[in-house]
Amino acid sequence: MTDDGNPDDATLVMALDPKQAGAWHALVELDEGFRARPHADNDCVWPERSGQVPYPDYSARVRAAWKLLQEVGAVTAVYQWMQQQPPALDAKGKVSAADALRLATTIIRSERFGDGNIGAAVNSGVLQAVVAALAAWYRDRLD
């Protein structure tokens, strides 16, 4: 644990569930898709909804990322995301596996409190960086 009560990097990474092989393989494929096409026009669309508060529609690949991040354990209650500033991507647009968990937890959990947080992460490339970091972590475990 760190001084602020949050888990250190090693503890966070232990939250990942490498036994979810199907979800991990799907996440690796999703990473390849994001690498080939980082942004798609339909990743986050805000359609007009007469008489309703607006909320986004996410593409199939963004919805898949949302689901898979939860299945592999990247969205964790261990990290107290509401009391922290989310980590930033490095100069190359990458993050460590531990910071990918911090970001995944922040992005996915924050959607509940504000529609479009996942869309903002996609538009800025943060979601793609999270998927890439976790896919790399899993690939390294296979070697």
Image: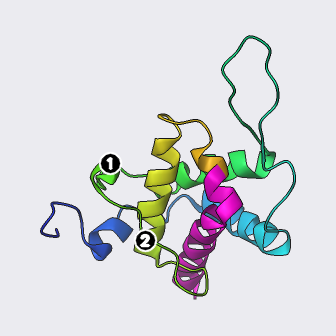
* Up-down relation of residue 29 to residue 65 (above or below): below
**What are the residue bounds of the magenta stretch?**
120-143
For mark 1, does the 10 Å Cα neighbourhood hold few (<14), some (14 to 19), or many (20 or more) residues? few
Magenta span contains residue 121: yes
Q: What number is the disc on residue 99?
A: 2
Magenta span contains residue 140: yes
1 and 2 marks in contact (CB < 8 Å): no
Instruction: Identify the secondary structure beneath mark 2.
Output: helix
State the image quarter where residue 34 is shown.
bottom right
Taking the spot 15% from the left edge, 60% from the top edge, the residue there is 5
For mark 2, does the 10 Å Cα neighbourhood hold few (<14), some (14 to 19), or many (20 or more) residues? many
Taking the spot 47% from the left edge, 34% from the top edge, the residue there is 113
Quadrant including the N terminus: bottom left
Q: Is residue 17 visible?
A: no
Q: What number is the disc on residue 82?
A: 1
Q: Which of 90 and 15 is in front in this view?
A: 90
Left or right: 17 as drawn, with respect to 20: left
Q: Which of marks 1 and 2 is nearer the N terminus?
A: 1
Left or right: 34 as drawn, with respect to 87: right
Quadrant including the C terminus: bottom right
Q: Can residue 25 be seen in this view?
A: yes
* Up-down relation of residue 124 to residue 65 (above or below): below
Q: Nearer the viewer, residue 19 or 81?
A: 81
Most extreme residue toward the top is: 51
Question: Residue 126: percent from the left, percent from the top?
Answer: 60, 65
Most common SS among magenta residues: helix
Question: Residue 122: percent from the left, percent from the top?
Answer: 68, 58
Q: What number is the disc on residue 31?
A: none
